[in-house]
Image (cartoon, rainbow, N blue to C red):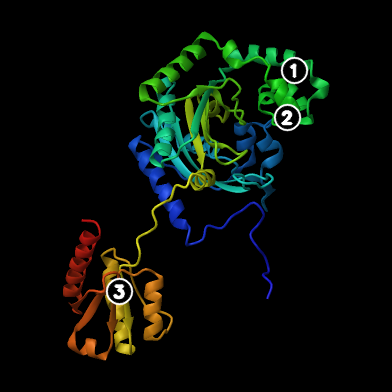
């Protein structure tokens, strides 16, 4: 029988056998965020379209080509979030978080949606971990945020990860830079790709980010932003580098980094992997000091980053880094007969209330098949209940690795106590 449908192109299922890998990363993200004083923020999966048009920028590829936008039955234009920052800023403003003690530090674990050609490391539904900080212009905050990302990669044991940083200045010094870019690129106008011809008038800094080989060659000799930084932006960038040096974070200044979103100012950065092909950026971010004001708030400096979970998993796989598998079943209680089956259910429930992983037969297997299943799921202990065990109130507990057996009382409190002791003993013998 043919399936009536399959997953949409550019999406992936996370199966039960693999979900522990995601959970491991998510917990590590949460732990790192907590260490830096960040608390979780959750925003809707869709927002009003004008949020992204104003926040991300109507000249970006994301807004022009990649957003999933639709009209509701009420006629509102709604867009599935293509990134996490705009929604976080909207929530910051809507709920008056600027009235709380600053800085406000928030992190998110979220899904994002972009209509792009799927390839390794690029999906139409993808997932990000992000950290956002509001209310400080101090370069120490930039370095702290970058350090948090670097710490995550260190904790994962990732190698061959390079950090590239740049400053793209403020609106004041970017005005002169834009003039220089336009003057330079005008000489090549007719040979530029169609997108870059449009960017030349509307968003000249995006010319530096073009992936078309011919246009990329032209960009190599283009004016660079660091040469046009005003004194304030130069001092800020020097401060970021000084704090990164103090934190022991290795970096390279790459003057061609501009990022693909219009809201960035001053610091921008990317963590790149050399092991996952063309989609090499596993984490990127920077400052967006004008975004809160652009969305209707009072001027408020802010900065943040997002790391792609799928790309991190690809990098770990490419480097042979394994994620610890979840703990196996603590005990499988097999049973023969209706009363024994009920007792197995009761004992498993008691064990589960203490946080242990216990299973019994819920399929209707025979005893031999039950024990075969216990082996398949890697149960550390097993126990068989039948009429005699129920009558005597005692059953044999078997260590599935050593084969050692011991009597275990079936009375609830005594059963928990004796099984816990047996498990602790086995844990000690395995890891003395």
Q: Disc 1 or disc 2, which is closer to the eye? A: 2
- Residue under the image location 47 percent in, 47 percent down: 320
Point out which mark residue 35 bears.
Answer: none
Sooner in the amino-acid sequence: mark 1 or mark 2: 1
Q: Which residue is mark 3?
A: 348
- The image shows residue 153, relative to residue 21, as above or below, that is above
Q: Residues within 10 Å of mark 1 (few under 14, many from 20)?
A: many
Foreground of the two, 321 or 370: 321
Q: Quadrant of residue 211?
A: top right
* Residue 402 on image: x %, y %: 26, 70
In the picture, the quarter occupied by the N terminus is bottom right
Q: CA distance from mark 1 to mark 2?
A: 15 Å
Q: Disc 3 or disc 2, which is closer to the eye? A: 2
* Residue 257 on image: x %, y %: 59, 25
Q: Which residue is mark 1?
A: 185
Q: Which residue is mark 2?
A: 213
| In this picture, residue 33 sits left or right of residue 213 | left
Disc 3, disc 1: CB below 8 Å? no
Q: Quadrant of residue 399?
A: bottom left
| In this picture, residue 402 sits left or right of residue 316 | left
* Residue 57 on image: x %, y %: 64, 31
* Residue 286 on image: x %, y %: 51, 28
The residue sitting at the top extreme is 231
- Residue under the image location 36 percent in, 79 percent down: 371
């Amino acid at each position: 029988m043919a399936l009536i449908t399959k997953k949409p192109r550019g999406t992936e299922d996370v199966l039960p056998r693999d979900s522990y890998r995601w959970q491991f990363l998510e917990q590590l993200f949460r732990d790192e965020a907590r260490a830096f004083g960040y608390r979780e923020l959750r925003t809707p999966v869709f927002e009003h379209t004008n949020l992204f048009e104003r926040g991300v920028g109507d000249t970006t590829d994301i807004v022009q080509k990649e957003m999933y936008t639709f009209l509701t039955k009420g006629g509102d234009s709604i867009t599935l979030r293509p990134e996490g920052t705009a929604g976080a800023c909207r929530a910051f403003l809507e709920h008056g978080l600027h009235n709380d003690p600053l800085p406000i530090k928030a992190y998110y674990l979220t899904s994002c949606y972009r209509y792009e050609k799927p390839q390794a490391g690029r999906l139409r539904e993808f997932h990000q971990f992000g950290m956002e900080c509001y209310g400080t212009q101090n370069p120490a905050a930039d370095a702290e945020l970058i350090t948090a990302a670097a710490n995550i990669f260190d904790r994962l044991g990732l190698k061959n990860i390079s950090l590239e940083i740049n400053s793209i200045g403020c609106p004041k010094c970017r005005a002169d830079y834009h003039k220089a870019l336009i003057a330079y690129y005008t000489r090549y106008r007719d040979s530029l790709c169609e997108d870059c011809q449009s960017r030349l008038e509307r968003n000249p800094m995006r010319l530096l980010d073009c992936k078309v080989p011919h246009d990329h060659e032209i960009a190599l000799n283009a004016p660079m932003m660091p040469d046009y930084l005003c004194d304030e932006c130069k001092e800020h960038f020097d401060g970021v580098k000084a704090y990164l040096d103090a934190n022991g974070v290795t970096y390279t200044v790459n003057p061609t980094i501009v990022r693909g979103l219009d809201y960035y100012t001053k610091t921008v950065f990317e963590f790149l992997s050399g092991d996952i092909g063309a989609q090499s950026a596993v984490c990127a971010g920077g400052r967006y000091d004008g975004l809160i004001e652009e969305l209707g708030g009072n001027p408020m400096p802010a900065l943040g980053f997002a790391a792609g979970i799928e790309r991190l998993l690809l990098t770990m796989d490419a480097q042979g880094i394994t994620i610890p598998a979840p703990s196996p079943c603590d005990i499988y209680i097999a049973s023969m007969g209706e009363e024994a089956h009920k007792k197995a259910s009761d004992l498993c429930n008691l064990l589960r209330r203490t946080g242990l992983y216990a299973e019994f037969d819920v399929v209707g297997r025979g005893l031999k098949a039950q024990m075969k299943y216990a082996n398949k799921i890697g149960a550390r202990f097993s126990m068989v209940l039948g009429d005699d065990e129920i009558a005597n109130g005692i059953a044999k507990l078997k260590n599935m690795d050593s084969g050692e057996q011991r009597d275990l009382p079936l009375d609830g409190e005594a059963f928990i106590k004796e099984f816990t002791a047996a498990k602790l003993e086995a844990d000690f013998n395995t890891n003395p």
